[in-house]
Image: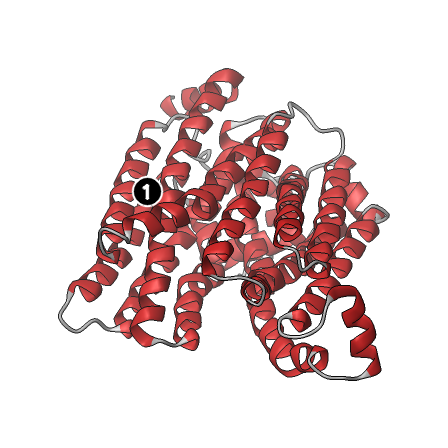
Amino acid sequence: MNQQNEIKNSSTRSPNKAMKKFMILVAGQFISSIGSGLTDFGLAIYVLTFTGSVAATGVFSICAFLPSILLAPVGGVLADRYDRRLMMILGELFSGLGLVICLVSVMSASPSIVVICIGVGVSSIFTALTEPAFKATMTDLLSEEDFARAGGMVQIANSAKLIISPALAGLLLQVTTVSTLIIIDMLTFFTTVLIIAIVKNGMVIKPRSDAARSFTREMKAGIAAIRGKSGMMTMIVIMTIAVFCLGFVQILSKPLVLALAGETELGILTTVIALGMMAGSILISCLKQTKSYGRMLSIGLLGCGIFFALIGVSENLLLIAAFGFMMFVFMPAIQIGAEVLIRKNLANEVQGRAFGLIGLITQMGYILAFIASGLLSDYLFEPFMNGNSALAMNIGAVIGAGAGRGNALLIVITGVALASVGIIVSRLKSVKSLETEELNTYETVVESCPEGL
């Protein structure tokens, strides 16, 4: 009887009340994002200073990034099988355990980079519990017309890591050490856990008679949900390509700017450019309802790609800042447009594992970009633009020649590719079909999975 009442109350809850609950959750995410940004910034500088090696800093970044990608599908299955609120709480707490490992190492008499990498790896592993559960929780709490607005709020919270944390960490490191940043991050975890615990109604998935279904079969159900529509697979390919292109700007923007200016200017540019994501997120969060999320995705890809390419054309820091800002303005439209199209076409009961699988596939675009951009820059584009061939001189007449302009050329090519994807998306029938196709129920998805799995 209590379960029936809970389901009934969940289905008839006030939209305004549900949005308020979600806004409280986003506030917790905002606090957690600032804390995570402090640790990311502080530990990256610590590792670089301690080792004097960019390669060691790269290994640190992989340890902090890759585990959460690889384990996202597992976190998705758990988010669909168990209480999503519990998954978020456990993910936050055990992520804090990884920070304890880092804190012990940096405060010891003989700090170990290996131990620090293990610590951030542990934290990243348990992040895989939190993110799929948080994304699926949006569907638990909100109605479809609020998805875009809520997505904009989430983007605002996540952008705090890029806008607030670097400046704050830089100031704190003038008067304290990296260990203080880690402690602050740990305190934000406890604050976030408390907020999640408070916002509890409507966050538990509805009871299912198949709770004892095998873990493997549940994973297969997630795969079946994704493969059930051609448009869904097309969206995954599009997002993987977009992530791959955007991964290039993460790697190439720093050497591009440092070839023109110093680290202080780079820090200012980073903050200004990141403000573009905040502006874009605010614009989308103000939208009550969007007529076409496919159009939103297409416009986001096109605009982001155009300004991405323009960054490589200019050698003027003010223009680079302006183009970078505009590029980031369009980025939330890409993520929110794609996420809403996918969310509308997935049964709520399977969203956790589906988002986990989608995250695994698309985020690998970053890893590939990190590898490809370094190799292409060091062994092809930089040597080419520093050469004296007729083609290099002709290109140099447009974008400039010398150190850093090989990276600029690579940015231009990648930006044009991203903009081209935006144009192609606007013409794809499979993407348009996601706006109108009927949602497959969870039972339909499960029936497509063999019983033996």
Is 93 drawn above or below residue 453 in the view shown? above
Residue nearer the viewer, 320 or 283: 320
Residue 11 percent across, percent down from the top left: 52, 21
For image coordinates 71% across by 44% down, the residue present is 300
Q: From the viewer's side, name the closer residue of 365 and 128.
A: 365
Q: Quadrant of the N terminus?
A: top left
- Residue that badge 1 annotates: 89
Residue 45 image-quadrant placement: bottom left
Q: How is the image coloured?
A: secondary structure
Foreground residue among 313 and 165: 313
Extreme-left residue of the structure: 109
Asked whether residue 418 appears in the rendered view, the answer is yes
Disc count in the image?
1
Q: Tag 1, which secondary structure? A: helix
Q: Is residue 221 left or right of residue 117?
A: right
Residue drawn at x 78%, y 35% is: 436
From the top left corner, tell me how far across and down residue 435 is, in percent: 76, 37
Q: The disc labelled 1 sits on which kind of residue?
A: Ile
Residue at the spot 74% in from the left edge and 36% down from the top edge: 438
Q: Position of residue 44 (x, y in %)?
A: 37, 63
Decide if residue 220 is on the left or right side of residue 9: right
Can the viewer see residue 79? Answer: no
In this picture, is 200 found above or below 445? above
Q: Badge 1 local density, few (<14 within 10 Å), some, or many (20+)?
A: many
Horizontal side, residue 419 vs residue 282: left or right: right
Residue drawn at (77%, 39%) of the image: 295
